[in-house]
Amino acid sequence: MPRPKSFDPETVLTKAMVVFWEKGFDAASISDLTAAMGINRFSLYDTFGDKHALYIRALESYETSILEPILAEIYAFQSIEDMKAHSLNKIDYHREHADQPCCMIHKAAISMAAKDQETLDRVNCIRKRVNEAFIEVFERLIEKGEIRKGITASQAAWLVMFAHEGMMSHLGAAYPPDQAKKEAITALYDSIST
């Protein structure tokens, strides 16, 4: 009869997620992971499989713990001004938290997705969910007459997603706030709104 685990797998998985988030897959060593998780190598392999399997589980954990609240924020937007204010606040947040790692999914997309199908599948799944959320919001805004004629909900969603992903990729060296706010975000929303 196997001995019961002396740790909670979900708790230690969250700790592994933080290591992968900060370092990425390649730079995160097994020693880094076991130290952060507070377990030995045998327990890591016995519970999660190899490092790659742990990484995929960590991406899934990120989706649940970090992405779900972001999706809730997106679905709650009621106007183009809500969306614009949210994007402008993101610029200030990124400048105030420049020491934080960029989005784990963004990091996975640029470092692992091209060489690992499971990572690519996970990234695509998450992007699809974000895209669908923005499309739903823009469909509502089109019905309310807030979006310029000739622009589809899908086009608007992709424009906003590209802008947000661009901001996330520059967390450590954030754009100058005035230009980012006035010349990028304000121009973006002005270009799609009525």
Image (tube, rainbow, N blue to C red):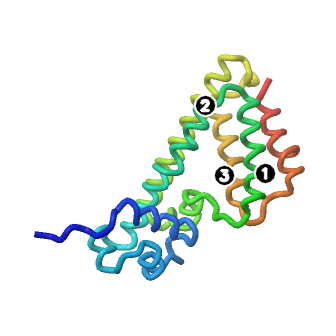
Label 3 CA crowd tier, 10 Å (few <14, some 14–19, many 20+): some
When the figure is inspected, residue 9 is found, relative to residue 86, above or below; the finding is below
Q: Name the residue under label 2.
A: 76
Q: Which residue lies furthest to the top in this view?
A: 144
Q: What kind of element bears circle 1?
A: helix
Sequence-first tag of 1 and 3 = 1
Q: Mark 3 points at which residue?
A: 165
| Residue 94 vs residue 121, the one in the foreground | 94
The CA distance from mark 2 to mark 1 is: 21 Å
Q: Which amino acid does label 3 sit on?
A: Glu
The answer to whether residue 29 is left or right of residue 22 is left
Q: What kind of element bears circle 2?
A: helix
Q: Position of residue 22 (x, y in %)?
A: 58, 69
Q: What residue type is labelled 2?
A: Ala
Q: What residue type is labelled 1?
A: Asp
Q: In which quarter of the image is residue 46?
A: bottom left
Label 1 CA crowd tier, 10 Å (few <14, some 14–19, many 20+): some
Q: Where is residue 64 in the image (x, y as percent from the top left)?
A: 46, 49
Q: Where is residue 171 in the image (x, y as percent from the top left)?
A: 71, 61
The residue under the point 55% across, 43% down is 69
- Between disc 1 and disc 3, the foreground one is 1
Tell me if I can see residue 117 in this picture: no
Disc 2 to disc 1: CB gap under 8 Å = no
Q: What number is the disc on residue 92?
A: 1
The CA distance from mark 2 to mark 3 is: 20 Å
The answer to whether residue 77 is left or right of residue 96 is left
Sequence-first tag of 2 and 3 = 2
Q: Residue furthest bottom?
A: 31
